[in-house]
Amino acid sequence: MTIDKGNILSIIKGRRSIRAYKDTPIPHELIEKILETGQWAPSPSNVQSWRFIVVKEPAGLRTLKDLSPGFPRKAAAAIVVCSNTREMEPFDAVLAAEEAAMAVENMMLMAYSLGLGTCPVVSFSRAGISALLEIPDHILPIILVALGSPDERPAPPSRKPLLQVTSWEKYNGQ
């Protein structure tokens, strides 16, 4: 298998959090591709506690947006990334968020490579989302991902120089 390292880096550098979307539905097949990349994210001890709930129907999506102040209003779909707390029980609770974040990053990169936009959202009512989606108590919503056809192309933000954020062998005090 040949890996196009340049393409991977351009996808990573090109992905942005999109907050403006076109009014375009997303084909089911593309959402499944995006979900599959989340499924292949790293997981502590391969527990795979993540659970993905896709919300596309207008009524449910409207209510989800009302429960999520930071959720882009025109996004065509939401992926609610949850953790099965029973499966994560042997681990520190922080690992559930880390596991979910790794799945979300994979999904956002795949969405970008497919020409779609995403925005991760953590400002939401957990109780409200759980009630709306009939999520049982042992499944914890962690991150929402807005998904849609982008109606903006934000410029990349600046990054600190690599030397400023990297130490070799031991911390250099920066």
Image (cartoon, rainbow, N blue to C red):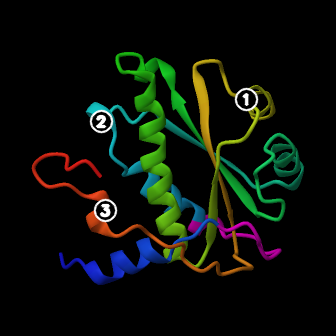
Alpha-carbon span between mark 3 and mark 1: 42 Å
The residue depicted at 20 percent of the width and 50 percent of the height is 172
Residue 121 position (above or below residue 129): below
Alpha-carbon span between mark 1 and mark 2: 25 Å
Main SS of the magenta segment? loop
Q: Earlier in the sequence, mark 3 or mark 1?
A: 1
Query: Image check: 170 left or right of 102?
Result: left
The residue depicted at 88 percent of the width and 50 percent of the height is 62
Q: Nearer the viewer, residue 64 or 19?
A: 19
Graded by Cα atoms within 10 Å as few (under 14), some (14 to 19) or many (20 or more), the crowding at tag 3 reads: few
* Label at residue 130: 1
For residue 50: magenta?
no
The amino acid at mark 2 is Asn
Graded by Cα atoms within 10 Å as few (under 14), some (14 to 19) or many (20 or more), the crowding at tag 1 reads: some
Q: Earlier in the sequence, mark 1 or mark 2?
A: 2
The image quadrant that residue 87 belongs to is top left
The amino acid at mark 1 is Ser
For residue 26: magenta?
yes
Q: Which residue is mark 3?
A: 164
Graded by Cα atoms within 10 Å as few (under 14), some (14 to 19) or many (20 or more), the crowding at tag 2 reads: few
Residue 142 position (above or below residue 12): above
What range of the chain is rendered magenta?
A: 18-30
Q: Earlier in the sequence, mark 2 or mark 3?
A: 2
Q: Secondary structure at mark 3?
A: helix
The residue depicted at 40 percent of the width and 67 percent of the height is 160
